[in-house]
Image: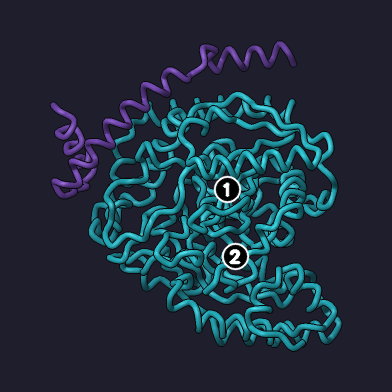
Chain colours: A purple, B cyan
Amino acid sequence: MDHKQIVTARLAAVGVSLSDDELDQLTTAYASLLKWETVIQGMVEAETEPALIFKAQVEG
Amino acid sequence: MASTSSQLAYLSLAEAATLIAKRELSPVELTQAMLDRISALDPKLHSYYTVFSKEVLAAAREAETQIRGGNYRGPLHGIPLAVKDIYESGPTTCGSKLRKDYVAQQDCTVVKKLKQAGAVMLGKLATYEFAMGLPTLASHFQPARNPWNLDMDPGGSSSGSGAALAAGLTFGAMGSDTGGSIRWPAFCCGIVGMKATYGRVSRAGVFPLSWNLDHTGPMTRTVKDCVLMLQECAGYDPYDPASARVPVTDYSAKLGQDLKGMRIGVPRKLFADNCNKEILAAFDKAVTQMTQLGAVVAEVDSITFGELWAVFWPLVCADAAAYHLEDLKKRPGDYNPDLRMALAAGVLVSATAYLQSQRVREQIRRRMLQQLETVDLFMLPTTGMMPTRIRAQSPGMFLMAEDFYIYTPLFNLTGFPALAVPCGFSAAGLPIGFQLAGKPFDEATVFQAGYAYEQATPWHKQHPTL
């Protein structure tokens, strides 16, 4: 499935329909969302939340 | 008091309050002057959707009677104010065809508080559609115009608030700010806007865009006016689930104190490689001014603009989509096109992406809180781009564009208080401004620095020719 098909299917699944031109624009936006997921993944700090909680407990 | 309409119109709120307290200015005279000016100028500005002509004059008469009777309530008593049309109070359209006939059954908390402080309500101010969707000449509601150049957008989404203040059509306004909607129009219109700490000012009765990121706050022509308005509208509200049970402090406590030794951090990595050169030059001059006022300014580390966008947009779009989903399914054609697509983009955000954004958001907040142990404030341009022309038609999906350089969402993600202050003009005569942000609930220090800068510079004394 290409991106436009994914966008169309996801919107249809919740009952939202847009024009073909708008779906093209939204496909570009979807590419941005995917890119941002990668950016965010790179920003997540190595320390997980449980580790931070443990650290906070130890440090009082 | 013998004064022309424009002399009255450009009094600061604080000046008008002093004259009213001394009974040298009548609230009725002041309100009538505003109504006359709105009638004369607003047909070309479109800053108001609704003007409460009869009601506001009746309220002004009542205020006058109370003050004459020795029952002066404080600096907002008898002062004409207005609110963005997403605040429930009478007709509340949200700038959308979907709500064009909606009339609120009661005032929202903030309007109630302002009225209790004695303010009189002029009306409801234009907004981007549901505080997000760009209005164009093809929209159901006409876009507000920038008083400095009527062909230009006044910024948004509190577009009418910015335009009305710059044009002298109100003494103060309430805006809302999910990603910069108080501070961006403040920048574009050359006025002051305070996005207070998350939870500081009630959002009960204000139409949501993103429950996680929405803030409310005052917009004015001067820093002191902003202090006076925030003092009255801040406070815990059980009707807003995010409202903070933190005591309201005296926001004027530090006004007039010098900046000697104040530590200001500039997160230059966020804007250095993408900011408009005129804005950057004006900002750097403002930094120099802060140094001359005694502040110690140093660069601090920050996320990049790309990282800010990556965290911000999935959150705001998904939250907005959740709120609007039923209307998006049933009445998609009633939204402006760019909002329709931004909401649809929110549908495409996966649950895992949303939650990762929230995790990273908290990490950013924690890191910046640590930075606030070594600096007192952050200082940066409000936005890296000048206002655009009012458009005849929707430009399509533009909000998520990667060259839409606006630096305000950083403080929606962190929830820190952030104040927009004017700091100059472009060669084309359009205002430029910067923002100061501080520790949660320490609005007083943010105001201190903004006031010191304002008093040392002439920008707040300049008004557009209309």
Q: Residue at x 56, y 57 (%)?
A: B204
Residue B212 visible: no
Say which chain tag 2 marks: B
- Given the image, on which type of amino acid does mark 2 rest? Ala
Tell me the quarter of the image containing the N terminus of chain B: bottom right
* Sequence-first disc among 2 and 1: 2
Residue B95 visible: yes
Q: Residue at x 56, y 49 (%)?
A: B215
Q: Relative to B303, does residue B16 appear above or below in the rendering?
A: below
Q: How many marks?
A: 2
Which mark is in front, 2 or 1? 2
Q: Position of residue B231 (x, y in %)?
A: 74, 58
The image quadrant that residue B442 belongs to is top right
Say which chain tag 1 marks: B
Q: Residues within 10 Å of mark 1 (few under 14, many from 20)?
A: few
Label 1 sits on residue: B241
Q: Nearer the viewer, residue B268 or B117?
A: B268
Q: Relative to B55, does residue B162 appear above or below in the rendering?
A: above
In three-dimensional space, the C-alpha distance between marks 2 and 1, rounded to whole angstroms, equals 24 Å
Please determine if labels 2 and 1 lie on a single subunit.
yes
Give the secondary structure at mark 2: strand
Q: Position of residue B115 (x, y in %)?
A: 67, 72
Label 2 sits on residue: B173
Q: Residue at x 59, y 65 (%)?
A: B173
Q: Residues within 10 Å of mark 2 (few under 14, many from 20)?
A: many
The answer to whether residue A57 is left or right of residue B19 is left
